[in-house]
Image (cartoon, grey):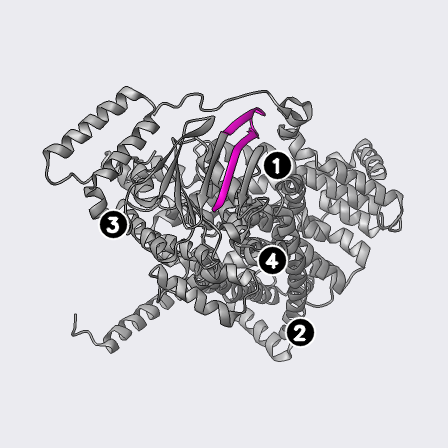
Amino acid sequence: MTVSGATQRTRPAMGGFWWRRLGRSRVVRTFGPFVPVVLAWWAVAELEFFPAAFFVGPDVVVAEFAELIKKGILPAYLSDSVTRLWTGVVFGLLIGIPAGFLVAMSRWARRLTWPLLMFFQAIADIAWLPIVIVWFGFSLTAVTFVIVYTIVFPLMISIVAGVEQVPRDMVRAARSLGAGRFRVFTDVILPGALPAVATGIRTGLGYGWRALIAAEIIVGTSGIGFMMFDARRAGEVTGVFVGMIVLGILWFALDALVLAPFERSTIERWGMIQTAEVAR
Amino acid sequence: MSTLEIKNLHKEYVDAYTGETVTAVGDVSFSVDRGEFVSILGPSGCGKTTVLNVVAGFDKLTSGSVEVGGKPVTAPSPERGVVFQSFALFPWKTVLGNVAFGLRMRGVPRREREPVARQYLELVGLEGFERKFPHELSGGMQQRLGVARVLANEPEVMLMDEPFASVDAQTRRKLQEDLTDIFQAKRPTVFFVTHDVDEAVFLSDRVVVLSSRPSTVAEIVTVPLERPRNWRSVLENPDFRHTVTHLTDLLAGGRAHGEEQAERLSGRVDSSSEPPVRADAGGES
Amino acid sequence: MALTSPAGRRGGKLSRRLSAALWFLLPFVLLAAVWVVIVEVTEVEMRIFPQITDVAGAFGELWSSGELFTHVGASLRRVVLGVIAAILTGIPFGILLGSSRWVAAFFAPLLRFSVALAGIAWIPLATLWLGYGERAVIFIVWNAMFFALAYNTMLGVQRIPTQLLRAARSMGTPRARMFTEVLLPGALPNIVTGLRVGLGYGWRGLVAAEIIAASAGVGYSIFLAQKFFRTDVIIAFMIVIGVLWLITDRAVLAPLERRTVERWGMKAVTA
């Protein structure tokens, strides 16, 4: 068949408008929606729908934010929180990923640990906080323990599911092409399970992150969670707002700088179905 | 009296990515009479599905007119039921629930709609499967259900968008024969989109051939075959082969290529007493 | 083949079930054994780590005094109220957002932001707005679930194949009925995912909120026990928390999934 002029293009229509191009830009699509929301927030605060003791506008929050930075409180607390999260995540991954693949690959390990995995996953991480404090006091060790706990179980369960989802034919293809057991693992199963690893990390971080905030709120001596609850005890709503916004920005940065690039460079690059789109 | 009347249908859309205007359908006019089976055939990407989508009311036309039963088409309506290539059955409804869906939407009470639904299930040979869910049926059975679901609404015209393209070759033949039987029995008005030449000729009273983009009607071919039809007798019928050859030429566009193929085909017909079983000439693209 | 009696086959099934149950229990038995041995050998103090018998004793005490039921009941009541509120608000909101491509594109980043913050981070604000007590705790459960549920519902609606929507419209479905006939069942695989994720957050939010803002409930009890170094009570309640979650998952979520998404042959986006 001769297909002549398959797509006949006439005039470069409305597409030339700058706002259309702008609407397609990633940054605008991500941050654009926040503009009207902040404006609405401002309007609600200005119109004083709620008493000022309960609800403050973005102007007040920004002023307080600048104040806290100037005093050095915010940077210090932020670095405390980030250090705790980071330590927990690193140890969580170091333990969770090998353990996950071990359980996934070995029938015996699977049989002996699967029910326990399910059960420990079911004990909400925050419930460990009291006993961990008994053991370690409120220290970096205690927080790290809880975060590692929150990350390891979802990660392991996710990896087992991911290894199971590697198509059998792909393993067979590799074997028939001459790959040994080890090569099948490194060249087929490991990359094949990567999307699951990404999903697991996302789930784990979603929980670990909450556990950190909870720990800081409940028994904290420093950190963003502590700052928020300290402000709440003093009845200063502004400090609470600042804390929540800082937490939100922190998660956004984590998502944009760590999680999303990892997912992009593996799952999306290979055109594998992205399950990580589910909100965690 | 024509049930479906398309006059100078022209459709442009703006490509969301490049922002350029693309002409999907250049200038298409034809009509479908009551109780007639008309196929639209064309090279891939010629906009035949766009024509169907406009008739169905899913897409708006840029200029021209589309009328069904004398009324211009503005939105989807049960008067123009669609059978989809992807079946588009509701996975959360049973077979019976799917067939009765249109009647339920019209507010027909359960007592009345169930016998009607069962009657149409019987028509397509799905009696006994009422309580199954669509995913429990084979591809062929799913599309039978798709047909029953539309016919149960007794539409002015049934629109079929390459309905058999995603079932295997043998099932497709069977479904095509069954469709002619159903057509024979119920005489619905059918507008059928396909890229399979054999299928178009086997099923239709007339075939509208579109040129490639920007598409216009190259020719409207009347199929000189008696009904009822079945593949065995149709394949032996020289009229069938002539029509298929003619349509293949039209689609190929190039004259030389077409003549050569015609010669080869007619030569084969003359030399062998038993005609070769042709695979789908149109093929899948 | 003809010789296999039905009884024999049933016996085979039974023994297979029995062995599955044994394999399920074995890891717990081993864990308990390790626990007993370690505590015996290291002679660790009870205020650091209790013997398994101490935990059983604490559990028995909680059971017979009725304390267990008071606290579990208080927690379950909050979860149920919060979850119902989240389902009634989150699912319709998600469907509403998902039914328009532009609205969905606009709200997606906002919702992602909110999901990340949902639950525990709201505790200071919730207690400030609603005071310490029941209302704040239920608010946290609702809040923890709402965003995850709304976001996943929105994704689910967006993933309904266009052909399905067109089929429904071409069969004369009125706009209002599209909601219940197509959008809700079509989005159900993702709604179930949202429920699961949301319940995970909600449950954690509950425990944290009870520690801070309640005078009953499992979270409150566990934290109270910590103040008195009653590790046996802590661990007894931890096990209760785990079992409650497993029951929620197995007795509510799994059957829901089996009866809808799996029965209909719709693949859920599993995590």
Amino acid carrying label 3: it is: Asn
Both marks 3 and 2 on one chain: no
Magenta range is B1-26
Q: Nearer the viewer, residue A235 or B273?
A: B273
Which residue position holds label 4? C177
> Marks 1 and 3, how far apart in space?
65 Å
> Marks 3 and 4, how far apart in space?
42 Å
**Which of labels 3 and 4 is toward the front?**
3
1 and 3 marks in contact (CB < 8 Å): no
Both marks 1 and 2 on one chain: no
Which residue position holds label 3? B230
Q: Secondary structure at mark 3?
A: loop
Q: Position of residue A218 (x, y in %)?
A: 71, 53
Which residue position holds label 1? A254
4 and 1 marks in contact (CB < 8 Å): no
Instruction: Using a 10 Å C-alpha cutoff, classify the residue at mark 1 as few (fewer than 14 neighbours), some (14 to 19) or many (20 or more).
Output: few
Both marks 4 and 2 on one chain: yes
Which residue position holds label 2? C70
> Marks 3 and 2, how far apart in space?
75 Å
Q: Is residue C224 above or below residue C92?
A: below
**Which of labels 1 and 2 is toward the front?**
1
